[in-house]
Amino acid sequence: MNEKLERIVREIYKEMSEGKVPKVELKSRNKENILFDPKTSVWKYGDNTVKRYASKAASAKSILKMLYIIDFVDEMSTGQKTSTLREMYYISEGWNLGKFESQDESDLMVEDLEVMTNYLREEMRLRPEESGASVIGNLTLTELNRKGEKKRINCRDDVGDSGYTIPYNVEKEKVELISADVDFVLAIETGGMFDRLVENRFDEKMRALLVHMKGQPSRSTKRLLNRLNREMDLPIVVFTDGDPWSFRIFASVAYGAIKTAHISDILATPTSEFIGITASDILRYDLPTDKLTEKDVEALHAELEDPRFNIPFWKGEIETMLKLGKKAEQQALAKYGLDFVTDTYLPEKLKEYGII
Amino acid sequence: MTELDTDRKEVSISEFFDKNKQMLGFDSPQKALFMTVKEAVDNSLDACVDSGILPEITVKIEELGKEKYRVEVTDNGPGIKRTEVANSFGKMLYGSRFFKERQTRGQQGLGISAAILYAQKTTGFPTEIITKVEGDMTAFHFVLDIDIKKNSPHKISEVPEIWDVKSGLKIILVLKGKYVGGKQSVEEYIRESAIANPHSTFHLILPDKRVDIERSIEEAPPIPIAVKPHPHGVELGELISILREFENQSIEEVLEDKFSRVTKQTARAIVERCKLGGRKISKLTRDDFEELLKAIRETEFMEPKKDCLSPIGGEALFKSAINSFKDYHPAYFSQAVVRGPFVFSGHPFLVEAIAIYGGDLPKEETIRVLRFANRVPLLYQSGSCAITRAVSSISWSQYGISQPVKDQLPIGPLVIAVHVASTKVPFTSEAKEAIAPVPEIMDALDILLKGVARQIKTMRKKEAHKSQVAEKFSLIEQILPEIAAKSSKILKVEPPDITPIISKVMGVVAFREVEGELFAENYTEKTHSFKVVLKGEGTFTETVKNLKPFQKVKLKFPKEVVSSSEIYADLPEPVLLGAYTLPKVFSDE
């Protein structure tokens, strides 16, 4: 059994044998205890902790549920199995009083365990439902497959046009990065744009590694970007729609998210650059637009208060968008033809950012 | 109020029926089907009461064609002697109830004869009656209809038939009708009849379903005692009829003999007051009768005898409510409260009610009020009924029930069943669908309903306590032991003893209800002596001496007191679970 998980169980058992009311202690996960660390530019937990004592039925139940998860994780690792978070939620039907009321509850408790142990969910053999994002470009890696073999894959030559699918666990024991003959990583929000760049062979022409984020990127996608940046020294460039929600996609890639503040160090890549679509692009390229909705405007105002956007570049862009009252999609660039994005827009902007 | 126009003999009965269709309850196919079942079932229930039989009644409705239904009602009652069948069923306006008053279901308009006439008029089918009285070898199967011209029964055939029962009666009618479900349906009528007649078993075979309701009690209600009318309850028409019936006697004699609570002296005083001394009844004018009635009204009498009323009864009503609403899994039932007898205009009456709350009863809808008059469910004319008005006039928000509009029915998962029993229920019309808001009845209902509402409030407060108690006990009885078991299983060691933890997480004297009994359990580390007071409809006290840690004691309160009272104990709040700290005022008593 994993040592950190076992320690939690030992502590509970010890307290009970001493006639004490058992408890678990973890970093407080409420908003007040999540701080933006200016030094590393990511979200992190503060020093506040909470203790959950088994003197109330609700917290006693949550301790019991935690024990069930730990036992389940141990069982899986013995049997070399993994399970999705959803599967675990359904399995908990058989856990008597440890049964979860909803998947949100069980997902949250897995995160609690991560917070307590610094042991990643993926390492606990629990994975999310959705499949990972895709990668195309001249990157060579090995993946430990289900047969226990390290399979060597080149993400340009050994894959089809939909690319290499990022597995839920991209930690070293599963995925080793061997070499990358590219100058930068371009992380793209939408599938339509990813396919456009693939079709236009942007990866080869511009020596780029293309990563399709599929909207808000999963943990493993962010973790892979983080590793590509740290281990291969590749700059990460984020390319999204030009609206407040896409700005948040960038922020979570660069600075982490509140929900995963305990693992910001390994998920966030603070040196990431946002290439567009910016509000100024809408003006500069005269792009077709949609009007901002009420919710969009609300989101932009919230972003003005968000420490992650508290730099002149973002302040300027957000305010410009508010002034324009408009937003634009990545594919709006097609106004000038199918090759405009690969021949003109991206090269121009990459040059300005000093990436090429 | 419309009076039945019974004097005009020249009017054919058929014409009469058409004229009074609405009043008789046969004004639409839907209502006609309902009325037919109702008349037959009410007759069966009454017949069973009179002979002390526990009724088992089967109602079968078949659709024969478009708006054409066959209704068959079978009972296990005493049956009817073959010589009386024709008159009992076929003769309109048969019999009179003027001279004796007692609590009966009473007939709606013309009763079953109206149903027979309606069936005959709408489908041409005669009515079939099969009946067997105890001791007879066979049953007799009658086919009869009504001779409209002669206003008399017309027997088409009569044949002996084998029917393997001790006694009973089956009536079959074919009529134009419309079968519906919902609040004014045959099914609802039977379901509600079962609530008001807990001694009865019903089987309902409908075109789309079958419903079986078993009786909730095994004792037949007492046979209602007939009493002479009280002079204050008599109307002019009745007074005239009674006196003329005995016109060979003197006025004083008739008053003394035929009315209750009239002595020789008061009879004489009345006659003197209206100056009718020595007059012959046959010579009295209408004005004389009016004077006599005035004198009677001005005279004081003892209140009428009240023992002639039979309530459904607290326990029986409680049992039938549980039986009828078990599918809703209600959170609780109030006790059934009976109040009275009281008197209005010389007629004794009593009121009783029960409330059913919570569970799967709809939360967002207007509450349901089940109305009963002499054990008969009232499904129509709810808005003008004294019961509905009395329920609406309570200010429900005081009792924790939402009432968005004052003087209207509140909203919530609540059912209130109210029964008014009297030798003469004052209906708003001949159709007998709603009780008139007579002040005395309204007052009695108001007090009755407030009592029931108070119980609901108490029980909702108890609910909060109960869930606290349940939560704590699930912690010590289930969750903590499971934590101990699970953690030791993972570590592959022996489970720890959790007794010391239990007193730590509890630290209280807990009051817990288990199957209606109240227990006090000491989960503190000290011994406690304390007083327990239950406050509900009354106040009950018990003292517990030296309850040691981890000791449990059963308190000797009756179950019905436990379920309807708030629990107080003279222990400070922090060591109390499932009860309130006894306020100083009570503890000094």
Image (cartoon, rainbow, N blue to C red):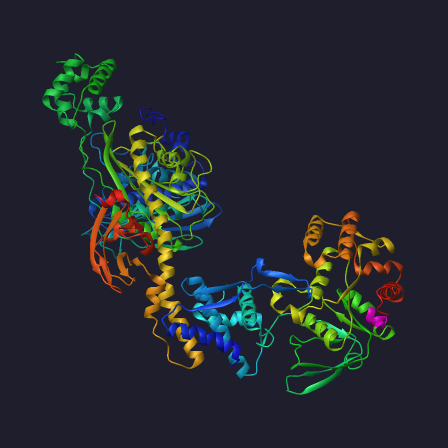
Q: Image check: B178 left or right of B312?
A: right
- Front-most of B303 and B118? B303
Q: Which residue is drawn at 37% across and 56% down?
A: B468
Magenta span: helix, strand or loop, mainly?
helix
Residue B490 is one of the magenta-drawn residues:
no
- Where residue A335 appears, x then y in whole percent? 87, 58
Name the image quarter holding the C terminus of chain B.
top left
Depth check, front residue: B106 or A239: A239
Q: Which residue is drawn at 35% across and 33% down?
A: B386
- Residue extending farthest front: A39
Q: Is residue A198 magenta?
A: yes
- Res B76 visible: no
Q: Can residue A340 be seen in this view?
A: yes
x, y percent for residue B220: 22, 49
Q: Give the range drawn in magenta.
A: A197-202
In the picture, residue A344 is in which quadrant?
bottom right
Q: Furthest residue to the left?
A: B264
Q: Is residue A282 left or right of residue B354?
A: right
